Image (cartoon, rainbow, N blue to C red):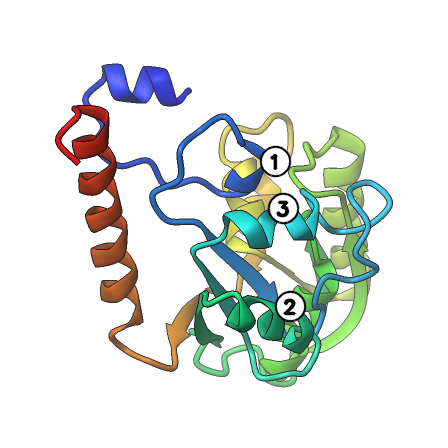
Amino acid sequence: APRRLAAEGADIIIMDDGFQSARLAFDFALLVIDSVRGIGNGHLVPSGPVRAPIADQLRHATALLKIGHGPAADRPIRRAARAGKAIYVADTVRLDGGSLSGVKVLAWAGIADPEKFYRTVREAGAIVEETRSFSDHHHFSEDEIADLIDRAASQGYTLVTTAKDMVRLEPGHGRAAELAAKSRVIEIEVRFDDPLAPAKIIDATLAAARARKLRANGKG
């Protein structure tokens, strides 16, 4: 995929779960850790939530980003700080405007940490009557789609999901369009404690890329 992107003229590739692609040269590697979940049991998928060994990720990381202000990320943050890595802190902010306050919902999600999404739904003021959790990147079957629609209709619940899950319904089959139409999405965005942090990350990435190209051309 990176070769194809380069051939098409891409100058920058932004990857999710990029630490699994060790054959690629990273100009900037950001390790993101949730302050409530932390690294869980520290085991690799499927025994735990970690996609690559934490020691390897810390070694390759340029910086760490802590999401939230809980204590679960403190240990890896301390290890990274001792290694001289930059540390950034941010929060996820809901953009729902309180429109779900007091609404009885059936919340469903196919992401790595559904419980985090359900917490966000509750923080929006919704009454979470039921939840349906699926695996990350889950492709929904016709039966699963029908179950969500019919269960919510029978109980009078509002369906709520993530933007990531909604995207997977767009090219869907059968009643996927109906589920998309009947589900509400809680939009969120990440806001850094330091408003200049995103610009700092971009500048550091571009500087590292230029230095790498100079070395490759024998000029560094």
Percent position (x, y) of residue 139? Answer: 68, 32
Viewed as shown, does residue 168 lie left or right of 148? left
Tag 3 secondary structure: helix
Percent position (x, y) of residue 34? Answer: 62, 68
- Looking at the image, which residue is at 68% across and 43% down? 51
Viewed as shown, does residue 199 lie left or right of 71? left
For discs 3 and 1, the disc positioned in front in the rendered view: 3
- Looking at the image, which residue is at 75% across and 43% down? 135
Contact between marks 3 and 1 (CB within 8 A): the answer is: no
Label ID, residue 25: none
Sequence-first tag of 1 and 2: 2
Check disc 3 and report the residue beneath it.
56
Nearer to the camera, 152 or 94:
94
Check disc 2 and report the residue beneath it.
76
Nearer to the camera, 51 or 85:
85
Q: What's the amino acid at mark 2?
A: Pro
Mark 3: few/some/many CA within 10 Å (<14, 14-19, 20+): few
Q: CA distance from mark 3 to mark 1?
A: 40 Å
Check disc 1 and report the residue beneath it.
176
Tag 2 secondary structure: helix
Mark 2: few/some/many CA within 10 Å (<14, 14-19, 20+): some
8 above or below 76?
above
Res 12 quadrant in image: top left
Sequence-first tag of 2 and 3: 3
Nearer to the camera, 165 or 11:
11
Q: What's the amino acid at mark 1?
A: Ala
Q: CA distance from mark 2 to mark 3?
A: 12 Å
Mark 1: few/some/many CA within 10 Å (<14, 14-19, 20+): many
Nearer to the camera, 83 or 109:
83
